[in-house]
Amino acid sequence: MSYIKYEQNGFVGVLTIDREKALNALNSEVLADLDAELDAIDLDSTRCLIITGAGQKSFVAGADIGEMSTLTKAEGEAFGKKGNDVFRKIETLPIPVIAAVNGFALGGGCELSLSCDIRLAAENAVFGQPETGLGITPGFGGTQRLARTINVGKAKEMIYAGTKVKAPEALSLGLVSAVYPAEELMPAAMKLAERISANAPIAVRACKKAINDGISLPIEKAVEVEEKLFGDCFETHDQKEGMACFLSREKPKPKAVFTNN
Ligand code: CAA
């Protein structure tokens, strides 16, 4: 039995962390199942992925504290690497990933959402990095991605003091793009995923790669990353069709082609 549920809705994949009795906490098995499920996604037929948590209460309440409680230094480092490798796989997945944060996003849960491209939250979402209260640092990328996503001082406050942030504040911090009543979260995530999927897949993937690869480079190198990916879009079916439709004032056609020909 897997701790991950996966559903395909047209071009959109919906991946659910399904360990509801532990508020979807991430133990080694959940991480291994997540890793395997990410590898199994058919990237030819999937244009956007949504990640959410099972149940009404929690997205992911962190890494599994029971499992971590007896780790040695070396095992702790290895556990951090296990989480980091899976989250890096999400961050570098060629297609956009939306976190639909339906409740607690604490520790590894906040970090999971930060490895996604876009975060949407339910009104009951709570974000936080409570690790220092447990005697550890955030271990699945939180010290790095939170400080790169929101104001550094606020990220440091959240991490040093364990300050929790509810959905409205997360919105004002730019940690999430939008907040919805709980029952509207998944429909809103689907709607956004479908809007992304309606655009040219090669161009959308190139945008993700350009942003991710360029963000930590000096601007003169970063624009070179964009130039290459911009060039790669030319001569593709969707580029030719999309521009021809605009010029002939025809209605844009659905973008159905992934190959470069
Ligand atoms: N690890 C293991 N089990 C967890 C868990 C976690 N991170 N979070 C919740 N659970 C379990 C609880 O132990 C409980 O299990 P039992 O029913 O078997 O006792 C079950 O989920 C329900 O939890 P609560 O009874 O505590 O539910 P609550 O509504 O009273 O509280 C909560 C909810 C505030 C989220 C609380 O569960 C909590 O504080 N959880 C821990 C949050 C946390 O500290 N996360 C960070 C972990 S460290 C980390 O993630 C390191 C890293 O960066 C890699």
Image: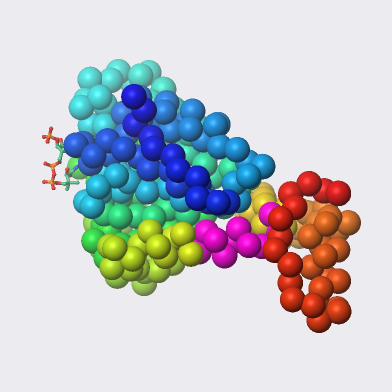
Of residues 98 and 214, the one drawn nearer to the viewer in this rendering: 98
When asked about the image quadrant of residue 77, the answer is top left
Which quadrant of the figure has residue 197?
bottom right
Colour theme: rainbow
Please state the horizontal and vertical placement of residue 15, each as a whole percent of the image: 43, 43
Q: Position of residue 99 (x, y in %)?
A: 42, 53
Q: Which residues are magenta?
A: 192-201
Give the overall secondary structure of the magenta segment: helix
Q: Residue 6, percent across and down? A: 44, 39
Residue 237 shows in the view: yes
Pick whichever, 89 or 144, lies toward us: 89
Residue at 71% in and 55% down? 256
Which residue does the image show at 75% across and 52% down from the upper left? Answer: 257
Which residue is at a point 64% across and 54% down the rendered structure image? 208
Residue 118, image x, y percentages: 48, 58
Question: Is 61 rendered above or below residue 73?
Answer: below
Which quadrant is home to the N terminus? top left
Residue 209's place in the image compared with 243, above or below, is above
Quarter of image, ligand 1: top left
Name the one closer to the observer, 157 or 184: 184
The answer to whether 195 appears left or right of 175 in the picture is right
53 w.r.t. 164: above or below? above
Queried whether the magenta region covers residue 16, the answer comes back as no
Residue at the extreme right of the image, as rendered: 235
Total numbered labels: 0
- The answer to whether one can see residue 128 in this image is no
**Residue at the (50%, 45%) spot, across then down:** 8
